């Protein structure tokens, strides 16, 4: 079974802090994604990566950056957390050429 | 750009009954996939069913089936013999199989199955 693991289920951070959300997948997938989930808005793509050290902006990249130094790991970085970044963050991965994605269990981030 | 619309924010059904969740999408592409994902209270997104656009036959997975109308750009999910464990958020999603294979999601439908 594909496993996508996010480092935390719940996080509480203070405004202005630098926040790292980590995601690891164990199936050698080329593509990795970070989505943000908010009530009534569904899932919105923040960033994605199709190879090591490669990244592409999604629909809502402002206030976020990403890092992919190894194929299995994709990190989402909030450079200076703000209260409007309080949300559920979902990591996903997929094989190259396949749009079917496998998801982690989500990180609920609260910025106070 | 592709868009996915789910017009039913919430639905409810009684156990053992059948329910249909609606989804429409917009694209100028011809070669794509459509998905239904389930997100139960545990938050783990689970793939329920997948439809390839070039296939005319509707996909079926046990109690779950789709009605794919390509010309109308409609992709509804039918759940037969609903079970309490079907209670979840259901997301319709669109994905390409060329280029960057990112998924575009609808806003979701919250389904409540009651005894």
Image: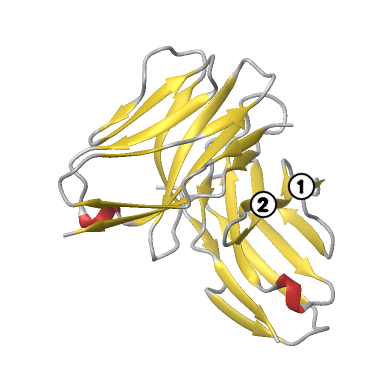
> Dot 1 lies on which element?
loop
- Answer left or right for B102 relative to A64: left
- Answer left or right for A84 relative to B3: right
Residue A96, quarter of picture = top right
State the residue position of label 2: A44
User: Which x, y percent locates residue B114?
Assistant: 22, 59
Check if mark 2's residue and mark 1's residue have beta carbons within 8 Å. Answer: yes
Inspect this view and state whether residue A35 appears.
Answer: yes
> Dot 2 lies on which element?
strand
User: Which x, y percent locates residue B11?
Assistant: 36, 51
- Answer left or right for A51 relative to A3: right
Nearer to the camera, B69 or B34: B69
Q: Quadrant of the C terminus of chain A?
A: bottom right
Instruction: Give the residue at x 74% y 73%.
Output: A84
State the residue position of label 1: A58
Instruction: Give the residue at x 54% y 26%.
Output: B33
Nearer to the camera, A34 or A83: A83
Chain ID, mark 1: A
Taking A12 as reference, is A104 above or below it? above
């Amino acid at each position: 079974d594909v496993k996508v693991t996010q480092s935390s289920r719940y996080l509480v951070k203070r405004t202005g802090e630098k926040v790292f959300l980590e995601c690891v997948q164990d199936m050698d997938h080329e593509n990795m994604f970070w989505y943000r989930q908010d009530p009534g808005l569904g899932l919105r793509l923040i960033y994605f990566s199709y190879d090591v050290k490669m990244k592409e902006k999604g629909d809502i990249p402002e206030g976020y950056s990403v890092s992919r130094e190894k194929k299995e790991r994709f990190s989402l970085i909030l450079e200076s957390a703000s209260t409007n970044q309080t949300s559920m963050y979902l990591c996903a991965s997929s094989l190259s050429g396949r749009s079917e994605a496998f998801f982690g269990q989500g990180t609920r981030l609260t910025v106070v | 750009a592709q868009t996915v619309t789910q017009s039913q924010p919430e639905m409810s059904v009684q156990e053992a009954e059948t329910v249909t969740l609606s989804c429409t999408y917009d694209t100028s592409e011809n070669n794509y996939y459509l998905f239904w994902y389930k997100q139960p209270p545990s938050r783990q997104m689970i793939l329920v069913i997948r439809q390839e656009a070039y296939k005319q036959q509707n996909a079926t997975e046990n109690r779950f089936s789709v009605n794919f109308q390509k010309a109308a750009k409609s992709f509804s999910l039918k759940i037969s013999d609903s079970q309490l464990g079907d209670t979840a958020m259901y997301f319709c999603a669109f994905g390409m199989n060329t280029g960057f294979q990112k998924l575009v999601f609808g806003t979701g439908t919250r389904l409540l199955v009651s005894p």
